[in-house]
Amino acid sequence: MNEFYRIFGKISFPEGLAVGEERDSNTVAIARNGKGEAVLRGTSLTGAIRNSLKENGVSCDVIERWFGKALETDESESFGSLVRVSDVVLETGNSEVRVHNMIDRHSGAVADKALFSIQLLPPKTAGYLLIYIQPPKGVDASFILRALSNALNGELLLGGNRNRGIGRMDASKLKVLKVNVDTAEGFAKWQDVRYNDRCGKFTDEGESLVGEDLKYKLNLSLDLRIPAGEDLVVGYGTTMEGEQSAPQKVCKADGKVYWRIPGSTFRGIFRAWMTRLAKKDGFELRYQKQDDNDPDLIGWGGINSLEKRKNIQNNPALLNDPILDLFGSLYKRGRIHFSDAYSVAEAKTGNLQQRKHVAIDAFSGGFVNGALFTNSVLVGDVCFKLNVSLIASQNLETWKREVLWLKKTLNALNLGIISVGSSKGSGLLEIANWEEVEKKLNKEIEGGV
């Protein structure tokens, strides 16, 4: 029996995404079609899915069998893809520009004077995803469907660097339609479905593709609230009003403006605190330089030898650094992701309070004459939603240790030991749903994967 498959449904990006395709001066511009609409290229999504399958243990031979193989030499074998992913036209609001530092891939450090900008599509950007799977007669597609379900149901992140806190895809509404094309009626139905898709008359047929959350993944939804009497500011450079820093905000696809704390902010804070916990537990870390004579090769684990690097790239576990294994290095991607955190309610000027400060001389510790500056802070009842996800280690002991470190870090944040953002605000946040989060963490620590 020969069966073809159609996967269709609405996907959304709760934190937005950056689908860069070309450079406009120093800015990575988003991809657009001939109508000027923002699009997520099918080739980009296919690459992300292939990489996700590889990270989930699917062999390269199996991936090439379904997604195609390029012609390497004149004598080598090549074949096309059995899985065809269409471009996704995105329903979105206005884009914004965000500034980032360029990372030197050879050292893992920030490159000197290398600022660049990316165009960012706003949170709640959505679109319709369409995938066709047409295997040859007699080829069972159940494996690839299960693999695609796992890839699309996990934390599939799109749009460049995973560390930015954006690009998380919600594919929970996808459905798969199975059609037996051995019969005349089935083949006619398949042709009708394809014709309607080309005409834009999409039908929502089939069964749900994705199931429950993956077994080897921990997802936490945190309600972060500014405690009474405290304030917060995560600045983003000098504002148009001349303030040295002010709370960040973003216009979502619905046209409403919300306060934002970047996911990269939480990533840096959690990485630093968990590094401290790992050091206290007696681990030798390559993440930290031991002295000034050590090479500044943090992303490479301080390893100069190209031969050793190549060996570790083939087997990242040889690096033997719990922090680089969890947060990622130049050998492999990290297994933890922090989304951008957005306020639950719309941004209001009533939550802003302006402060004046005097600049301090870095050498004398005294104030600089005439050097006044201002900044704004968030005050009042402001609550943020943050999503933290963790792909489990295959080692049970490692997994329990990582979850324990995460629990201790979250507890420190909740107790006010860890502060967020600029020192011009207290930076304290409390976890309003801490009991629920703690219960979920304890279940993982006690039960494991």
Image (cartoon, rainbow, N blue to C red):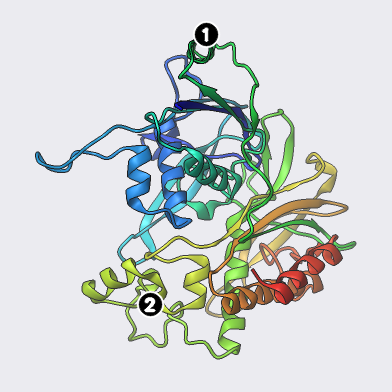
Q: Position of residue 125 (x, y in %)?
A: 62, 32
Q: Position of residue 408 (x, y in %)?
A: 71, 76
Residue count near mark 2 (Cα–Cα under 10 Å), binned few <14, some 14–19, many ≥20? few
Residue count near mark 1 (Cα–Cα under 10 Å), binned few <14, some 14–19, many ≥20? few
Amino acid under disc 2: Leu
In the rendered image of this protein, does residue 100 appear above or below residue 367? above
Tag shown at residue 277: none
Q: Quadrant of residue 256?
A: top right
Q: Position of residue 124 (x, y in %)?
A: 66, 35
Rendered residue at 37%/56% (across/down): 113
Looking at the picture, tell me which residue is in the foreground, 220 or 148.
148
Rendered residue at 60%/45% (across/down): 153
- In the rendered view of the protein, which quadrant contains the C terminus? bottom right
Amino acid under disc 1: Cys
Looking at the picture, tell me which residue is in the foreground, 341 or 133.
133
Q: Position of residue 129 (x, y in %)?
A: 55, 28
The residue pinned by badge 1 equals 199
The residue pinned by badge 2 equals 318
Confirm whether residue 28 shows in the render. no
Looking at the picture, tell me which residue is in the foreground, 348 or 7.
7
Looking at the picture, tell me which residue is in the foreground, 25 or 344.
344
Disc 2/disc 1 C-alpha distance (Å): 53 Å
